[in-house]
Image: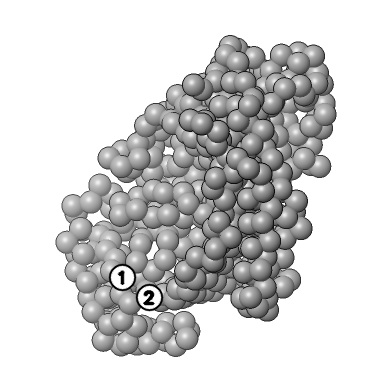
């Protein structure tokens, strides 16, 4: 279907310096069981196209769900009109934009097609999880859900570009809340960080069954646990908390459009400036962060971004030094600094903007046991539950669901309401140990928001656990 729409557009495409059409078809299924009760099943289907025109130094775009010849012609006319209106009035001359004619395909891995598992089987699986999650007299809230989205995109350009991609997104989720009196504690399945690409195999049903019982037990255990102590101490972060730390204090501040001020009104700017790229010491020598669109099964893997730029693995931070930003074609030309193929859009009715893809912290040489053994006094934290960071992505404060004291090289007592705060470069400068490949986990989240109008996009973060020294830790009330 997408190829026929592209052929239809080629027949009516305007005679301009450059045009592109990005066609998107998406189907989804969301299944949820809460308190052992099946919730309304949600099936979705959506299709449309975004037309972009660059002409005489201006750029315009228009989206349409009318994929007939007349609908595409109307969208092309609107994009051309906006291009002419913006010529000479934009903050940048779009005639300087580089255009690419990349050709290729991408498809998510799939061992067991989602549709091959009957709906009744998926519902029974969620009921089984609910039985495990709801055990215990103090559990008052529990749920389990599965989300699957299949997205097919085709980008065709006037330069001969042709990028066809088929993505399969799987997002399992579950959690439990325990309460006693006025006290309530929550444990979840990695805080919605377990999303991946693939088919049914991405669910890892056995691991979820094992985790469901543990989640229920830990939520109840936290009720009687003491509050996390306060003070400066060593901090070990599990991968399901590291993904939030990477996301907020590395991913977002390295976005080039934030450095340019494009996000200032909505989501803030960045303490990083373009002149810092290539020499700024972002963290300790152990800090190595990559943009990696090639990692099999990770949530934001792809071969081309939504402007048709071939995606390749690149270091963003190498041995602690900032070497590259997160920005697509337009931002790279505007700033004059290197970026990555990360111009991405949500669906057919949004333009691509600078977004994170797979932003991964590369493994080091320490085992989890090595990290624990090295700590005289500290805390081991898991699973984010709250976050706050300033507009420039410099000062932050994060809270976790679960923690355990580390004393004289051993895990001792579970504590509740753990929090920590820091300043981004100082915090990463205190990175002392990085987990080895055996501790490395491939994770991802489906709900990173950015842009006006808002775009909720899928991003991946693969990481090992890490140990930081001298971090300000405190408990809740």
Q: Is residue 101 visible?
A: no
Q: Is residue 417 above or below residue 13?
A: above
Q: Which residue is mark 1?
A: 63
What residue do we see at 48% from left, 51% from top? 447
Please tell me which of labels 1 and 2 falls first in the chain. 2
Q: Is residue 385 visible?
A: yes
Residue 34 lies, in percent from the top left, at 54, 58
Residue 413 versus residue 351: which sits nearer the camera?
413
**Alpha carbon of mark 1 to alpha carbon of mark 2: how far?**
7 Å
Residue 405 horizontal side relative to residue 280, left or right: right
Any mark on residue 423, and which? none
Residue 358 lies, in percent from the top left, at 59, 50
Residue 58 lies, in percent from the top left, at 25, 60
Q: Is residue 122 above or below residue 383?
A: below
Residue 457 versus residue 191: which sits nearer the camera?
191
Q: Quadrant of residue 98?
A: bottom left
- Do labels 1 and 2 touch, CB within 8 Å? yes
Residue 113 horizontal side relative to residue 326, left or right: right
Residue 121 lies, in percent from the top left, at 67, 73
């Amino acid at each position: 279907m997408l190829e026929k729409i592209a052929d239809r557009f080629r027949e009516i495409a305007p005679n301009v310096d450059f045009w592109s059409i990005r066609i998107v078809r998406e189907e989804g299924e969301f299944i949820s069981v809460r308190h052992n009760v099946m919730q309304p099943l949600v099936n979705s289907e959506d299709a449309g196209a975004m037309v972009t025109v660059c002409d005489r130094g201006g750029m315009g775009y228009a989206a349409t769900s009318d994929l007939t010849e007349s609908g595409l012609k109307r969208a092309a006319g609107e994009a051309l009109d906006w291009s002419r209106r913006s010529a000479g009035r934009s903050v940048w001359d779009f005639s300087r934009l580089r255009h690419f004619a990349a050709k290729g395909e991408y498809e998510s891995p799939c061992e067991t097609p989602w549709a091959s598992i009957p709906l009744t089987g998926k519902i029974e699986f969620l009921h089984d999880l609910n039985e495990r999650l709801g055990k215990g007299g103090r559990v008052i809230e529990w749920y389990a859900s599965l989300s699957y989205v299949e997205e097919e995109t085709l980008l065709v350009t006037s330069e001969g570009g042709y990028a066809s991609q088929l993505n399969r997104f799987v997002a399992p989720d579950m959690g439990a809340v325990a309460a006693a009196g006025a006290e309530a504690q929550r444990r979840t399945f990695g805080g919605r960080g377990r999303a991946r690409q693939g088919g049914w195999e991405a669910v890892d049903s056995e691991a979820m069954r094992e985790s469901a019982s543990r989640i229920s037990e830990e939520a109840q255990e936290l009720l009687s646990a003491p509050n996390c102590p306060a003070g400066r101490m060593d901090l070990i972060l599990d991968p399901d908390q590291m993904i939030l730390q990477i996301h907020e204090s590395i991913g977002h501040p390295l976005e080039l459009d934030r450095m340019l001020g494009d996000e200032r009104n909505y989501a803030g700017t960045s303490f990083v400036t373009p002149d810092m790229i290539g020499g700024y010491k972002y963290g300790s020598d152990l800090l190595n962060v990559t943009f990696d669109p090639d990692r099999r099964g990770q949530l934001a893997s792809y071969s081309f971004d939504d402007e048709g730029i071939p995606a390749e693995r690149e270091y963003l931070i190498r041995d602690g030094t900032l070497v590259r930003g997160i920005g697509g074609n337009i931002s790279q030309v505007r700033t004059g600094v290197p970026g990555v193929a990360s111009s991405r859009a949500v669906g057919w009715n949004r333009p691509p903007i600078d977004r994170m893809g797979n932003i991964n912290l590369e493994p080091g040489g320490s085992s989890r046991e090595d990290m624990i053994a090295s700590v005289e006094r500290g805390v081991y934290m898991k699973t984010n539950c709250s976050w706050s960071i300033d507009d420039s992505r410099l000062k932050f404060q994060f809270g976790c669901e679960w923690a355990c004291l580390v004393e004289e090289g051993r895990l001792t007592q579970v504590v509740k309401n753990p929090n920590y705060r820091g300043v981004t470069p100082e915090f990463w400068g205190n990175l002392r140990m990085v987990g080895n490949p055996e501790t490395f986990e491939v994770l991802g989240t489906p709900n990173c928001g950015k842009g006006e109008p808002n775009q909720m996009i899928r991003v991946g973060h693969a990481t090992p656990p890490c140990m930081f020294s001298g971090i300000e830790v405190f408990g809740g009330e």
